[in-house]
Amino acid sequence: MSADARIDREASTMNHRCETGQKLRAGWVLLRAVVGLFCGWLTVTAVAAAEYRFSPVNQSNISTAAAYWNPIVAYVSEKSGVKLSLKIGRTSADTTSYVLAQEVEFVFSNHLFSPDREALGWKVFGRRNTPAVRGQLVVLADSPISNVAELEGKDIGFPGPEAFLAYKLPYGYLLNQKINARPVFGGNMDGAFAQLISGKVTAVGANSQLVEAYTKRENKYFRVLWSSEPMFDLALMASSKVPEKEVEAVARAFLGMQKDPHGRAILAQVNQLIGLAPDIHFIAADSKDYASYRRFYQTAPVQVR
């Protein structure tokens, strides 16, 4: 083969290799683009499918709490486009433990206003438009007990150690009055009332709203021995890790229920279940509404902080 022929053949081979290399590089570019688009689609899908947990404090037994909250959660999820699921523990303390372990993103609670818990960054955005509530010490209407001093040495029922209105306020009052009483926890307010009715405890620490609701629901009557200053009901709150846009969407859905015929019907139905007036609904609120809770922690006995 002549020198010129060899040169021509080598040039042809090199051209072929270059074309092949260019095709391979083009293929890799296309493949990377496709993979990038696919990964991006997966990311968008994952974001769209994000589900947040909502934990309301146990104010009644689990079945009643679920029957009250599930229709509300379903409505808010649909209206906001932000999927919420209900997460309730066996007791109010269990439910709050989920919050402190950062296992939930939205709450209905008044357990987060102590100085150490405020540092967690939960944001208040709403509450129910119920009248101000009070922490109370109550006995059955026919009880021989007529004043707080007579509770010395007695067993007193409380929902649980996390209950602000129904435990921290009334038990803190007993401690400040140097009245030695033994706390007995019932798991929730219904459980505490059951202990009182059965005779296991002499009195209970209670939330005034729940005392009234229980009377309507169960036809049981109580005598109030002591009441705290009035305070706002539990707060709707969002974790700082939830994007602001999604918090705003959830807040709009909660706060708009009363303006929507379907939402209004849901509220009337579930309010009847727990003894609230049919027109009770969610309204806007912020951290300033809960200043009285913060004042309590400034002077509260160490045992209940």
Image (cartoon, helix red, strand yellow):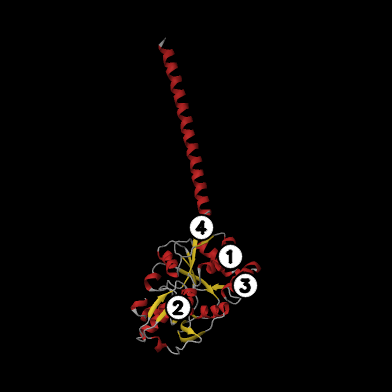
Look at mark 2 in the image and give the residue it sits on.
166
Dot placed on the residue nearer the N-terminal end, 4 or 1? 4
Q: Is residue 165 above or below residue 238?
A: below
Look at mark 4 in the image and give the residue it sits on.
51
For badge 2, the amino acid type reads Ala
Mark 4 vs mark 1, CA separation in Å: 17 Å
Category of crowding for the residue at label 1, using alpha-carbon neighbours closer than 10 angstroms: few (below 14), some (14–19), many (at least 20): some
Q: Nearer the viewer, residue 236 or 226?
A: 226
Side of 216 relative to 206 (left or right): right
For badge 3, the amino acid type reads Ala
Look at mark 3 in the image and give the residue it sits on.
268
For badge 1, the amino acid type reads Pro
Q: Which image quarter: residue 120?
A: bottom left
Q: Which image quarter: residue 151?
A: bottom left
Q: Residue furthest top?
A: 1
Which residue appears at 49% of the width and 45% of the height?
Answer: 39
Q: Which mark is residue 71?
A: 1
Q: Judging from the image, what secondary structure is the residue with disc 1 in? A: helix
Number of numbered discs present? 4
Mark 3 vs mark 4, CA separation in Å: 27 Å
Tell me the quadrant of the picture where the N terminus can be found. Answer: top left
